[in-house]
Amino acid sequence: MELDAAILSRIQFAFTISFHIIFPAITIGLATAIAIWEGLWLKTRNPVYFQLAKFWIKPFAITFGMGVVSGIVLSYEFGTNFSRFSELVGPVLGPLLAYEVLTAFFLEAGFLGVMLFGWQRVGEKLHYFATCVVAVGTWISSFWIIAANSWMQTPAGYEIIDGRFEVASWMEVIFNPSMPYRLAHMLLAAMLSATFVIGGVCAWYLRKNREQAFARKGLSMALWAALVLAPLQAVVGDFHGLNVKEHQPIKVAAMEGIWPEKEAGAPLLLFAVPDMENETNHFEIKIPKLASLILTHELDGELQGLKSVPADERPYVPLVFYSFRVMVGLGMLMIGAALWGLWLRRRGGRFESKPFLLLMTLMIPTGVISTLAGWYVAEVGRQPWLVHGLVRTIEVVTPLPAERVLFSLTLFVLTYSLLFCVYLYFMAKLVRKGPPDMARLEQHMIGVNAPGFALAWVKKLQHQVVED
């Protein structure tokens, strides 16, 4: 019964964090894009930039709200489902999560209202400052969350006193060996997620022959962003992979499907069916020696395999193996789409090519899917450890009755599925409605240019009195 409860608790946390991560993956990039558009509008006074910012701020607000609501649950699950874990690592992880609330969440909450509702109530420079603060707040939030999670992957700067983790060096805790790589990888993933949401929606407008100026500018900027971000993500991913090989070689073995205790000249498996029971792969499609070349920079480089550790210290290989290929495959597709867009740009047909616009529309969810796949690689690949090499997941699960955990898991699945359907409905409704027209934007610009909404209102009243 306890084992069943442990598995159900892990499934519940995996489900809730998978649902939650969808929304920060979009809002981090959207907040940055909105700040860029608003800054470009202030500099150039091109109304299309203002139109882009005004349109995307509503999807951002809905997505941000969903992220906040779904994220709160995770903190409670630490105490309800993994209470022993909180006791062991509380002195390390507790302050990190508190710093995220104090430095990022409060910052975002303080300026979010101005960003969303202050267009005609504050001056344009103050509004732009609020938008930039919210964007920076999302980056700061990512910093602390990734620092906490990275410490669980590559613990450092700690000492164990009376069975509990205590901080010996905050600098080593925060900037642990994997943190810089994982932070860069996650931020780029978030930027790419938003990039392909923006580019896909704009491509949909072009396919429907709607909002031409808006869609052309949005798609053009998204393609430039993808052309920079997607190849850069591949480079950062390579450095991250080398870091994982150094500190978590068994995770790399699961990612690459390497079973022998040591394997020199390991092939890159394009496809295989991992068999954990027989400790082998079936139906392999491979490129000889390429895995060794990528991970050691030598054709005959030696890699550690899954059999180098006992079976109970290996992750669930199929999920790690396939998730890694989904992440890499979608990443290559993003690079391909960006290069295709560059080729069409030089030919002057990126806005007219029906196949390309269809591809961009279909790629709307690819950034989020690849982010989720990467998260599964990182988290499932660390198992059976919750703090790598030090604390096993099974050791810190709260001994709850399995039927209670199953009940709460069922409620989460039903509630979150309903919430996600509602979220998709309103997002689709906003897209179908389209951006505000230029006539309405001109009225808003007058309010923004005024020192404040109250002064603009008084001037309007004075004008009416004179006419009367």
Image: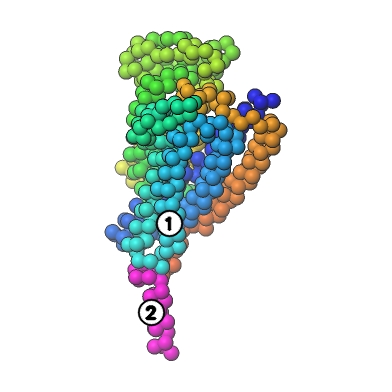
Residue 206's tag is none
The residue located at (49%, 50%) in the rendering is 64
Residue 162, image x and y in percent?
48, 26
Q: Where's residue 461, x and y in %?
A: 42, 82
Which of the 4 image quarters holds residue 268? top left
**Residue at point 34% right, 70% down?**
451
Residue for badge 1? 110
Q: How many labels does the image show?
A: 2
N-terminal of the pair, mark 2 or mark 1, is 1
The correct choice, above or below, for 233 with respect to 437 in the image is above
Pick the front one: 245 or 13: 13
Residue located 42% across and 61% down the image: 114
As helix, strand or loop, the secondary structure at mark 1 comes to: helix
Which residue lies under the disc numbered 2?
459
Q: Determine if residue 130 is in view.
A: yes
The disc labelled 1 sits on which kind of residue? Gly
In the image, what residue type sits under mark 2?
Lys
Q: Give the range drawn in magenta.
A: 447-468
Q: Nearer the viewer, residue 253 or 365?
A: 253
Instruction: Report x, y in % for residue 66.
Output: 53, 48
